[in-house]
Structures are given as structure tokens and as C-alpha cells.
Amino acid sequence: MKKGTVAWESPSNIALIKYWGKIGRQYPCNPSVSMTLKNAVSRTQLSFSERKDKWINFEFEGKENLDFAKRIEKLFEGLNDELPFLSQYSYSITSENTFPHSTGIASSASAMSALALCLCSMEELITGSKLERDEFLQKASFLARLGSGSASRSIYESYATWGGSDAFSKASDDFATPFSKYIHPIFKDYQDYILLVSSKKKKVSSTAGHGLMNNHPFAKTRYDQANSNFEQMLGILRSGDLENFIEVLENEALSLHGLMMNSTPSFTLMKPNTLEAIELIRDFRNTTKIPVGFTLDAGPNIHLMFPKKDSNKVDAFVNEQLTELLEDGKYLKDETGLGPKQIYTAGGE
Ligand code: PMV
């Protein structure tokens, strides 16, 4: 086959138990579990044609992006064993996100998972053989992991784990494992409002962030804590115990930020308004008994998580008390999503 085009849409995800620290070929130092989002997605199209001087051209939202092109080049170079045909073609890749730039939403998770799915579709086009759906997704998750660890989990709808654990025999370091079939109904349409405290570019890249865990004085304690929180969280996702959900969720978020604060070098990624919003969220929860909890990624923005049935009351709380702490009063409403969608596949001579 001389040329072809494939395209996929793939979502971001929010980690409930955080992956922070990696070894070897992007293996996680502890297991993680995440909720797949619905509205925050990347749409990526990959066209391949006969190899020319320029190997990879990457455009993000209509503009050439050399940094991401380099990252893709590095990824492709490392995939010789898995996808030996990659070096035979040149690539024109375009990608766009449905969510605004630099909002602290993990765009590498959606972008790398969409790209990995494109590579799996391309392989099917070139070889003319189709994998079973489960195998296809597992391969995509494996490839996504090599692009960005958290991207491995975006391949699956609703909830996914990544990283081997005694608490879940199907879990693996190599790829994510779907967890949706074990989920209590309360979590099936769980809400995640992303409160934009600041959209400034992150002070620490995630690669540098994971690197902070090498020789971190609390690394072993953290990995023990993460394993224990992981086991608890899987139980909670099955049982629907919201009180413990919130306790573990917030413990993970603040542990991640604590680890960054006492790393060398040290990073404080929360802003004063992040802390103020956290206080207000906890006060609201204590007074109303509405089970809203928060988590954070490696940035200042807050993910406010709660059951769908409480949406009206939480909307009022956010509008009355939190929007004044947010950049331009902005927040994005998201919720549990159904996973990636194939958009297009065509190839020819
Ligand atoms: O996938 P990476 O390398 O961008 O790391 C993601 C790290 C966190 O978002 C902080 C946690 C996680 O598990 O998603």
C-alpha cells in the first residue's frame, strides 16, 4: 500500500489514583486508575505516503508544532520492533482538541491515545488483517503508554487501571485494563467539572515531574500508599461508597502535590485560589452533606467530582462561590465518557 489516511477521536482521563514515577520503558512505579472523560477529546488524523526527506509533519489546530513532531519522531523511532513498517513512510499528522489550550487538561493523554489508535488502524490497512477488538485496543493501549503513560488508560470507556497490582489480577504494567464492568451505578455517569484557576503553561513537564521521584526521600512510602489507595479505590468503585471515595480521591491529589513540594528541586503548582477553592469545597460538603470531592493533576486547576443527581445544587455552588476564584470565571463541564471513536480509514495504491 502506497498511501492512506486514518483518523480517531480519543478522550482525556482524570486519574483517581495517580501515576507519578516511572522506570525503564515508561513502566509505572505504582498502579493507577482513572475515569475516562466525555467532552475533552483530541481528534487526530494520520496520512501516510511514500517516504520523503521530511519524515513527520505535525500540525496542531492548523499550525505546525515542531516540539510535538519531535516527540512523535522519538516515539516512532522506538517502535521498530512493534511496527516495523513505520520507517517506510512519511507522515502528515493533524490534531485538534475540543478543550481550550493549556487548561491543565492532560492533552497528552488524549493526543497520544488518538495517535496510537491511528497507528493500529494503519497497521490493519497495511497488513490487510484485522485484530479482534480486545486485541486491537490492548495494542493501542500499549503503544499509547509508550507515548505518554496516562494515555494508556484513555483507550477504554468509563474507568481503566494501569500498572500491575496484587489487588487486580488483570492489571498490567504494559497496557491499561478496562474496569467499567465492575463499576457501581453511581459512578456510571459521574461528573467532573474542571475549574480553571490558571491556564498558564505548567512549570514542570510531566517527564521532569516523574523524574522527581528518582531518589525522592518519600518514594517508597509513596509507592506503598499508592498501592494501598489503589486497592481501596477499586473496592470503592465496586461498592459506591462515596465517603471513602472522596477521602481517597483527595488524599491522592494532595499527596501528588506534597511530593512535588518536597522534591529537590521543589515545585508548588497550586495557586492561592486553588487552596481557597479547596476550603470552600470542603465547607460546602460539610454543611450540605452533598458528596462533592476534588482532585488535581500536576497543575493548579481543580477537578470537582460528584454524582450526576447533585448537578443542580453543585452548579449553584460553583456559580455562587467558586467562579470568582477562576480565570475569567471559566470552568468546563465533563463527565464519564464512552472512550475513543474511529472517524475515518482509507488506503490505496
Ligand atoms: O502520562 P504523563 O507522563 O503525562 O503523566 C501523568 C501524570 C498525572 O497526570 C499527574 C497522573 C496520572 O496518572 O494521570
Image: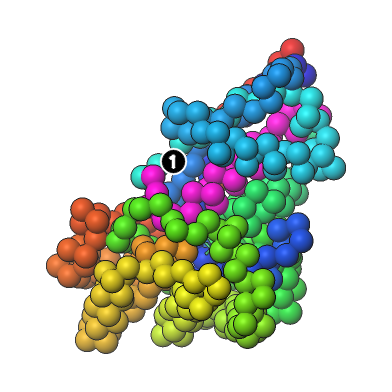
Q: Is residue 125 left or right of residue 46?
A: right
Per the rendered image, the range of residues in magenta is: 101-127
Hey, which residue is sitting farthest front in the picture?
265
Q: Is residue 214 visible?
A: yes
Q: Residue at x 76, y 32 (%)?
A: 86
Amino acid on which the number 1 mark rests in the picture? Asn
Above or below for 40 versus 335: above
* Quarter of the rendered image showing ligand 1: bottom right
Q: Is residue 118 magenta?
A: yes
Q: Is residue 192 left or right of residue 179?
A: left
Dot 1: element: strand
For label 1, count other residues whose C-alpha is less than 10 Å away and answer few (under 14), some (14-19) or many (20+): many
For the stretch drawn in magenta, the main secondary structure is helix
The quadrant the N terminus occupies is: top right
Viewer-proximal residue among 260 and 232:
260
The quadrant the C terminus occupies is: top right
Hey, which residue is sitting farthest left in the picture?
320
Q: Which residue corresponds to mark 1? A: 97
Q: Residue at x 78, y 29 (%)?
A: 87
